Amino acid sequence: TPTKGGSIKENFKEKIFVQNAQVQAKQDQVLVEQKLESDRLEKQKAEQEAKANLEAKAKAKAESESQLLKKFELFWSAYPNKKSKKEAEVKFKRIDFKKHTFESIMSSLKKQKQSQDWIKNGGQYVPMPTTCINQERWADEVQVPVQQPSHTDVNSYWADKLHAQAPIENFVPTLVLGEEFN
């Protein structure tokens, strides 16, 4: 029996259409939910990676600062004019160690400590550490005087000269028959 407004066939087609639309709507909803979950997981993964990178950078920075502090303490312990330590530490942290190696700075400091400019008048002219750092004094050419031993007596002079000579190796005195040995 036909229902109001159409035949059984039309009603059946309409029900199938509605069911198909409902199934399609459910599938679309599942796809949307899957996409949202995928996006959420990607975002969560990106946040975790960013956090891990941040922690790694913080750890590397802490290690770098620790190494830098150790280097400064070595510099400070070797520097003869120990004034304004905190300011010197701040300036030291700004040194470009890619341009100037710590070893070259310390080597130069060792030479400068022997220079006449730093020795005279009991070290009166040794620059402040901040001045040394600000002006990159480790790049200066340093003339270290060669000290000649001063001798007050002739015997010590000749004794030093004899000690400075290279020893004769494998010396074996020989006598030739018929010659006198002196």
Image (cartoon, rainbow, N blue to C red):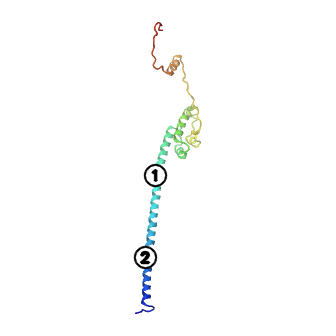
Q: Amino acid at mark 1?
A: Lys
Which of the 4 image quadrants contains residue 13?
bottom left
Q: Secondary structure at mark 1?
A: helix
* Residue occupied by mark 1: 59
Q: Position of residue 148 (x, y in %)?
A: 55, 24
Q: Amino acid at mark 2?
A: Lys
Q: Residue furthest left?
A: 1
Locate the N terminus by quadrant.
bottom left
Which of the 4 image quadrants contains residue 139?
top right
Could you say which is closer to the camera, residue 94 or residue 51?
A: 51
Could you say which is closer to the camera, residue 93 or residue 34?
A: 34
Q: CA distance from mark 2 to mark 1?
A: 49 Å
Q: Nearer the viewer, mark 2 or mark 1?
A: 2
Query: Considering only order in the chain, which callout, 1 or 2, is on the residue closer to the N terminus?
Result: 2
Could you say which is closer to the camera, residue 36 or residue 65?
A: 36
Q: Position of residue 162 (x, y in %)?
A: 50, 19
Q: Position of residue 111 (x, y in %)?
A: 55, 34
Could you say which is closer to the camera, residue 129 or residue 11?
A: 11
Is 150 left, or right, of 26 in this rendering? right
Identify the residue at horizontal 43%, vertical 90% (top origin).
7
Dots 2 and 1: beta carbons under 8 Å? Answer: no
Which of the 4 image quadrants contains residue 132?
top right
Identify the residue at horizontal 44%, vertical 77% (top origin).
24
Q: Which mark is residue 26?
A: 2
Q: Position of residue 125 (x, y in %)?
A: 58, 35
Q: Secondary structure at mark 2?
A: helix
Disc 2 packing (10 Å; few <14; some 14–19; many ≥20)? few
